[in-house]
Image (cartoon, helix red, strand yellow):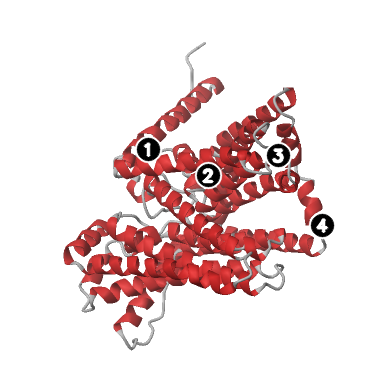
């Protein structure tokens, strides 16, 4: 009787499976090294250092602020901690689902010739989760709230647990995102996903209108986790950490299964856009209008732009609507949404055409007109996304004072121009050849996105906090006075980016890069 292992031997197949998965884990390191070689090292180190310093500051500094651990505000944060844990999980779910399972470590068209496993893709998407501006801000907010709620005497256990929960929630969101993306790629999956999404929104709205949303949030399992973390160092705290770490490890391992299923299916939504027919429109009256039409089509027809707009515009608005945020706290929303919109394509705005950039350069239009059209379309995208968020947020904010309304509008104007000028400058200075047709594509390499995310988060958050303080001062012209130098500086920097684009050598470098 033969004793050699055969293809039907369960142990042999299991060993082969484990060996393949281990190779997939090793491939993540190889792919990361490949991506790192395409990014300027000095800027990457600076961006990563700033990211680490801000994270450490968010976890440590609030614990030493006045009122930390003892004031009424600290007590309210303790009561809201389970809701904050659940809210972060919902955020990661929405972000990963919108990006089709998470961001790509390497674009799919570049990896066709390489045997990269879907497990490698899954693990790479987990590593790229912090590139989301909403993820960064919510992570910092969660760590800072935990530190402030407990104060300097007992913040370490809670902050450690909160950080581990961030990792676990991200892994859970990745699993759900892969499942949803696999469902989207089935025959009627797209309709099913939309119906389920609308049903979820309707359920949340019904709970809010009937004043049962708070009870539903209190019933979530995150309450047990928070109670365990607040108990301090001890067996209950250790048990809570073990549960969180176990959830994280299980989610990382299970996420590879739907990732493999998704890889076998065709992206129906993206293929429908590329193979669709579009009726020709009448000739425009000016070169600017013609370029504007082309740019708008390249943005609004793209699957990642539409999904990203839905998450950026509706998500924060619903959160603020459910939380009933006051007017002085709404100033954080425009910067959050505008920064997220820039990370969808604005930080590398000239990459939208890819090889079509060569054709576009042959058109008989001035370079300044091309720049104006691209900047205007990006401005429209940022204004529409942040405008929808604010429209939802103000529904329950009540009637504002003149100072609150002035501060909010000035914040909106300032952060949109800040993000616009920064995006156009970065697009000229550091262009990349990327394919933004995929729902999982990023406009720049992962390490470059870390730097962009950190810079945008830091600048817009500081600006929002300035105007949040001005909203509490009973002098509405003060916000306009403070906003004036911000607006003037952003406009000057935008004009400087325009002058750089007009230069033939700089424009040729950008066009040849994005077309490659």
| Label 2 vs label 3, nearer the camera | 3
Residue 169 shows in the view: no
Rounded to the nearest angstrom, the CA distance separating label 1 from label 2 is: 24 Å
| Label 4 vs label 1, nearer the camera | 4
Rounded to the nearest angstrom, the CA distance separating label 2 from label 3 is: 48 Å
Asked if residue 161 is positioned above or below residue 359 in the image, the reply reads above
Tag 3 residue: 69
Residue 388 shows in the view: yes
Q: Residues within 10 Å of mark 3 (few under 14, many from 20)?
A: many
| Label 1 vs label 2, nearer the camera | 1
Tag 2 residue: 261
Residue drawn where x is 43% and y is 63% of the image: 418
Residue drawn where x is 59% and y is 31% of the image: 249
Q: Residues within 10 Å of mark 2 (few under 14, many from 20)?
A: some
Tag 4 residue: 212
**Which numbered disc covers residue 275?**
none
Along the viewing direction, whichever of 493 and 341 lies nearer the viewer: 493
Residue drawn where x is 61% and y is 66% of the image: 471
Horizontal side of residue 93 vs 424, given as left or right = right
Where residue 470 sits, quadrant-wise, is bottom right
Along the viewing direction, whichever of 137 and 364 lies nearer the viewer: 137
| Label 4 vs label 2, nearer the camera | 4
Point out residue 327 in the picture as x, y percentages from the top left corner.
65, 66
**Which numbered disc covers residue 32?**
1
| Label 4 vs label 3, nearer the camera | 3
Mark 4–mark 1 contact, CB under 8 Å?
no
Mark 2–mark 3 contact, CB under 8 Å?
no
């Amino acid at each position: 009787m033969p004793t050699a292992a055969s293809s039907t031997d369960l142990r042999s197949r299991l060993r082969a499976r484990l060996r393949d998965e281990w190779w997939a884990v090793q491939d993540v390191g190889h792919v990361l090294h490949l991506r790192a070689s395409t990014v300027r090292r000095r800027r990457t180190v600076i961006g990563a250092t700033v990211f680490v310093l801000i994270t450490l500051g968010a976890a440590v500094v609030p614990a030493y602020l006045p009122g930390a651990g003892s004031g009424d505000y600290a007590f309210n944060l303790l009561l809201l901690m389970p809701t904050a844990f659940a809210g972060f999980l919902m955020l990661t779910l929405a972000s990963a689902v919108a990006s089709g399972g998470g961001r790509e470590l390497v674009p799919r068209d570049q990896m066709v010739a390489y045997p990269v496993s879907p497990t490698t893709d899954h693990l790479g998407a987990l590593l790229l989760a912090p590139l989301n501006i909403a993820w960064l801000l919510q992570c910092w907010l969660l760590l800072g709230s935990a530190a402030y709620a407990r104060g300097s005497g007992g913040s370490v256990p809670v902050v450690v647990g909160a950080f581990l929960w961030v990792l676990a929630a991200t892994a859970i969101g990745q699993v759900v995102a892969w499942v949803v993306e696999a469902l989207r790629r089935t025959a009627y999956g797209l309709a099913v996903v939309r119906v389920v999404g609308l049903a979820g929104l309707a359920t949340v709205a019904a709970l809010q209108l009937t004043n049962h949303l708070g009870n539903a949030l209190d019933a979530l399992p995150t309450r047990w986790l928070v109670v365990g973390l607040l108990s301090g160092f001890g067996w209950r705290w250790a048990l809570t950490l073990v549960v969180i770490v176990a959830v994280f490890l299980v989610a990382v391992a299970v996420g590879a299964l739907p990732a493999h299923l998704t890889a076998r299916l065709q992206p129906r939504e993206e293929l429908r856009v590329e193979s669709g027919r579009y009726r020709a429109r009448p000739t425009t009256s000016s070169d600017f209008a013609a370029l504007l039409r082309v740019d708008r089509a390249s943005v609004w027809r793209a699957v990642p732009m539409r999904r990203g707009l839905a998450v950026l515009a509706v998500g924060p608005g619903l959160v603020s609507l459910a939380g009933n945020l006051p007017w002085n706290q709404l100033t954080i929303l425009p910067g959050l949404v505008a920064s997220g919109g820039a990370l969808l394509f604005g930080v590398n705005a000239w990459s939208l055409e890819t090889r079509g950039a060569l054709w576009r350069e042959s058109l008989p239009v001035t370079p300044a007109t091309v720049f104006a059209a691209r900047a205007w379309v990006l401005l429209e995208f940022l204004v529409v996304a942040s405008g929808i968020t604010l429209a939802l947020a103000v529904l329950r904010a009540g009637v504002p004072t003149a100072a609150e309304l002035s501060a909010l509008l000035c914040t909106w104007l300032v952060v949109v121009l800040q993000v616009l000028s920064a995006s156009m400058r970065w697009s000229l200075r550091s262009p990349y050849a990327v394919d933004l047709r995929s729902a999982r594509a990023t406009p720049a390499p992962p390490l470059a996105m870390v730097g962009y995310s950190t810079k945008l988060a830091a600048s817009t958050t500081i600006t929002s906090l300035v105007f949040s303080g001005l909203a509490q001062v009973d002098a509405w012209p003060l916000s306009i006075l403070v906003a004036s130098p911000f607006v003037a500086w952003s406009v000057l920097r935008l004009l400087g980016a325009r002058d750089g684009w007009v230069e033939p050598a700089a424009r040729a470098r950008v066009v040849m890069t994005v077309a490659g």
